[in-house]
Image (cartoon, rainbow, N blue to C red):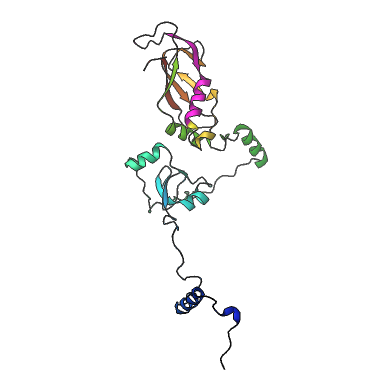
Amino acid sequence: MSARLRPSLIPRCLSCARSYLEAGATEWKPLFCVGGQTRGISKNKNKSIAVRLLKPMAGYGEPDRYVHIAREVMRNRWFPKRIARYAVGEELKRIKDGAIVVERDYGFKIPSPSKSSEPPEPVEEEPEEVEVEVLQKAPKAPKVEGIQPQRAMDLLGVLLPQKLDFVRSPLGETPDVVDQTMPIYGSVSKADIVQKIRSLLSHNDEAARIRLEESDIEFVDVKLDDPTRVKHLGMFNVKILLKGSDQWPVERKVQVVAQGES
């Protein structure tokens, strides 16, 4: 004897009956497909980037060599351990133009320290006294807002233009030829130069954290009544050297032009 259908399952209109028939004729499919949706999955998940080595790495090369490395390795291991740094600004442009070669040295090996055949002579010194004396004579190099002075100098050398322009009004008629003896209203001080450099570095997240002081800037190759400022039109050389850095200073030109001069 066939089972009776419950009244609630009996179609009550033609549209309902058609739906029951179509549902019975359609092949059953599981709720979740085996393949799954792949749209939106990144194809560049393991894309590598160009970095500059700060330490010798076996299979990669010596310091200052540019190599490719996976983004995850750089972000999680190499950058926190100061093994390498990201290529920025002008470096990226030169890499794209082919001026800088990004190539890994697979055969590079870190040389092991040479071992002397003779044992070293014993030194009769008290470790505690030596440690205190070293700490007093060699203070720890200061950091610049979380950036090492050497790294900050690298960024200054890459991001700063060769010439810093300042516009001032001359005391008198604007000369046809730039006269370095022509006085100006006010002056161009070290504070003005610091403010100019900070404005230029503000577009780079890392360089914007550099703490540049007036004492880090020096006018060179010119005799000034006040060594902290210039009071004439002309071109002046300045030297930038951050405290704690053992690198060569960054040299740039400061040009003071008359207002309205192109």
Quarter assignment of residue 168: top left
Q: Which residues are magenta?
A: 173-200
130 horizontally vs 231: left or right = right
- The location of residue 8, given as percent across then percent down, is 60, 78
Which residue, as the protein is rendered here, is positioned at the far front? 13
- The location of residue 141, given as percent across then percent down, is 57, 34
In this orientation, does residue 127 appear? yes
Q: Residue at x 45, y 47 (%)?
A: 56
Q: Quick check: 172 above or below 254?
A: above
72 horizontally vs 102: left or right = right
Which residue, as the protein is rendered here, is positioned at the far left? 98
In this orientation, does residue 246 appear? no
- The location of residue 165, given as percent across then percent down, is 42, 21
Which residue, as the protein is rendered here, is positioned at the far bottom? 1
Placement of the N terminus among the 4 image quadrants: bottom right
Q: Quick check: 9 above or below 206?
A: below
Quarter assignment of residue 95: top left
Q: Quick check: 38 above or below 64?
A: below
Marks counted in the figure total 0
Q: Nearer the viewer, residue 35 or 210?
A: 35
Q: Quick check: 155 above or below 229?
A: below
